Amino acid sequence: MRNSYPDAETRLENIYKRLGTRSPSCVACAETDPRCMELHHIAGQAQHDDLAIVCRNCHRKFSDAQYDRTATDAAHPTMEVIGHYLVGLADLFRMLAERLAEFGEWLLASASLMASPEVAS
């Protein structure tokens, strides 16, 4: 039986085409394996078409948060779209801030381990 899937190189090229870049990186955690990347609708798929590249793990986290903010029959649909968009951006920034804080703490801990008695005097 012949394999009906494209070869690895073709699959990778298809991923790059879908993501729109040859160097994808998760905007939240910096994962860079293209096979792990997905496109996330920042405001939710039903609200707006703007996308962010995220890994599958982060995508699940962002999408789960969006499920708690379902669309309504708002009297002002434009305001609802903007609201979903802003909250979606805040979700991205919140996760990014967590990663920045973790990296900053790691740098501080690493710097203190590298300090030698000669440098301190």
Image: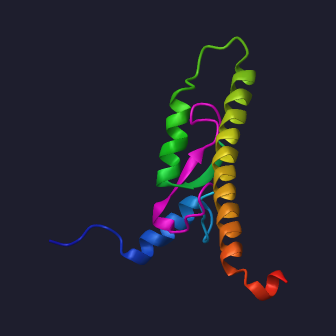
Q: Quadrant of residue 10?
A: bottom left
For the C terminus, the quadrant is: bottom right
In the rendered image, residue 66, in percent from the top left (x then y), is placed at: 55, 33
Q: Quadrant of residue 53?
A: bottom right
In percent of width and height, residue 14 lies at 48, 66
Q: Looking at the image, which residue sits at the far bottom?
A: 118
Magenta segment includes 13 = no
Q: Residue at x 43, y 77 (%)?
A: 9
Where is residue 48 drawn, in percent x and y?
65, 36
Most foreground residue, 53 or 121: 121
Q: How many marks?
A: 0
| Position of residue 120 in the picture relative to residue 40 (left or right) | right
In percent of the image, x 69 and y 50: which residue is there?
Answer: 97
Residue sticking out furthest to the right = 121
Magenta stretch: dominant secondary structure: loop
The answer to whether residue 58 is left or right of residue 79 is left
- Looking at the image, is 76 positioned above or below residue 68? above
Q: What residue range appears in magenta?
A: 28-48
Residue 31 place in picture, x, y as percent: 55, 64
> Residue at coordinates 57% horizontally, 47% vertically from top-left?
40
| Residue drawn at x 52%, y 50% as measured from the top left | 58
